Image (cartoon, rainbow, N blue to C red):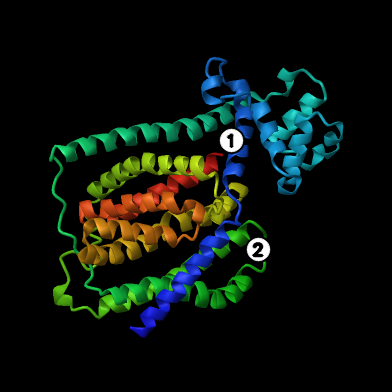
Amino acid sequence: MLLAALSLLLAGAIWLSGLVDSLSRPSVSPSLTLQQQELSLLAQPALPPSLQPVLLGEDPRDALLQALQASTPADRSDRQQLLLGLLQEDQGALELQNRWPNDALIQRLICERKRLKVDECIDADLASAAAWRLAVSGLLPLLTVLVGSLLLLVQIIRALRGRLQPWPVMEGPGLSLIDLVLLVAGGFVVISAVGVPLVALPLVASVTAGLESPRREAVTVVINYSLMALPSLLILWRQLKALPRAQAPQGGWLQWRLRPWPGAISSAVAGWLMVTPVVVATGWLLVRLVGDPGGSNPLLELVLGSKDPLALFLLGWTAVVLAPLFEETIFRGALLPVLAKRWGTAGGVVLSALLFAMAHISIGELAPLTVLGVGLALLRVSTGRLLPSVLMHALWNAITFLNLLVL
């Protein structure tokens, strides 16, 4: 009991400190906006004039110039400083042209600054490829939101008419609240945040000593995440091992229930579609009310700034495989059923979602991740299985990862 109380106090202090510190972390939104505007400028020659207002909005050249001017010189990279100089027709910018010989946008702007014919500066293949990327990055999310909103509306109507199938009885491990505190606060927060870095830092330093950026950062992410997940998984394994086997429900304590696969996949896709418009609306409303709070996940910046295939594979492996497996095991496999048994299904869904969001220690992502956590928890409750939640979480991370790659 004393150990659980101490773990809870330490975890609360660590989470609070982390959430406050996240306010000082930069937001990924400005980088995404700049990437989108650069892509728009590259794609403009390949788009019919009738589609340009739909896909590009305002003039992409002016939009990119204004975005670069709005940033401070300290926040601009050397490449962005060169882009700004070229867009402002600064003659001195041409002296830096050889630093980015393979950068399509910079070479096009340099070509135009040399006052050649504009048509001669356009690479039709590159413009066409950029147009396809722009269409995917812009239209696919919009289509997802529309389809998801329609599915969500259908589900709401069916629920109001009493036509939904009754949810299965919530089954899970027979753990106590003290067990959960030791699992989440003790293992997931305190040991992982305090103890693991003492082991991980020298290990990571030795493993990545001969690597160059961005592979060094990617390998660091994989090792750190794996080691941080280990304490909680070991604690959960010991807790489940101590439970009487005869009392375990059919399908095991965590209710993975791997088969049938088709039903798990279709449920995961439907859940992802329906939660997407709600998460998007939450993020939009947050920005409208308080502005961009910052504190984006550092992994997003790594993906945006990396072009190394191995580094991207390792980052993708962490986001799409390791994170869903570990986080769903803890939050929807162990935490949700115990909370639901004590405080009801609604209470368990909301509490587990809030703890899931707080565990990411990002004040800017707290509200959207809570909504995502509610969606993942409802999928676990409605299907009576953990696998669909894992697949939905993996799909969410995979789509986010692919959108970053497209940009």
Q: Position of residue 398 (x, y in %)?
A: 44, 48
Residue in the foreground of this view, choosing between 311 and 14: 14
How many C-alpha atoms fall within 10 Å of the one at disc 2: few (<14), some, or many (≥20)? few
Residue 369 shown left or right of residue 343 in the figure: right
Find the residue positioned furthest to the bottom.
Answer: 2
Q: Quadrant of the C terminus?
A: top right
Could you tell me which residue is drawn at 46 percent across and 30 percent down? 139
Question: Which residue is disc 1 drawn over?
Answer: 36
Residue for point 31% across, 79% down: 238
What is the three-letter code of the residue carrying label 2? Answer: Leu
212 lies left or right of 389: right
Instruction: Name the residue tied to disc 2.
Output: 211
Q: Secondary structure at mark 1?
A: helix
Judge depth for marks 2 and 1 and give the one in front. 1
Dot 2 falls on a residue whose secondary structure is loop
User: On the image, which quarter does residue 276 sit in?
Assistant: top left
> Between marks 2 and 1, how big is the CA–CA gap?
30 Å
Tell me what residue is drawn at x 53 percent, y 15 percent. 50
As drawn, 105 above or below 282? above
Looking at the image, tell me whether mark 2 or mark 1 is earlier in sequence order.
Answer: 1
Residue 208 percent coordinates (x, y): 62, 67
Q: Which mark is residue 329?
A: none
Q: Is residue 151 visible?
A: yes
Residue type at numbered disc 1:
Gln
Q: In the image, residue 297 lies at what x, y percent?
A: 53, 54
Classed neighbour count for the residue bearing mark 1: other residues with Cα under 10 Å, few (<14), some (14–19), many (≥20): many
Left or right of 92? Residue 120 is left
Q: Nearer the viewer, residue 162 or 395?
A: 162
Which residue is at the far front?
289
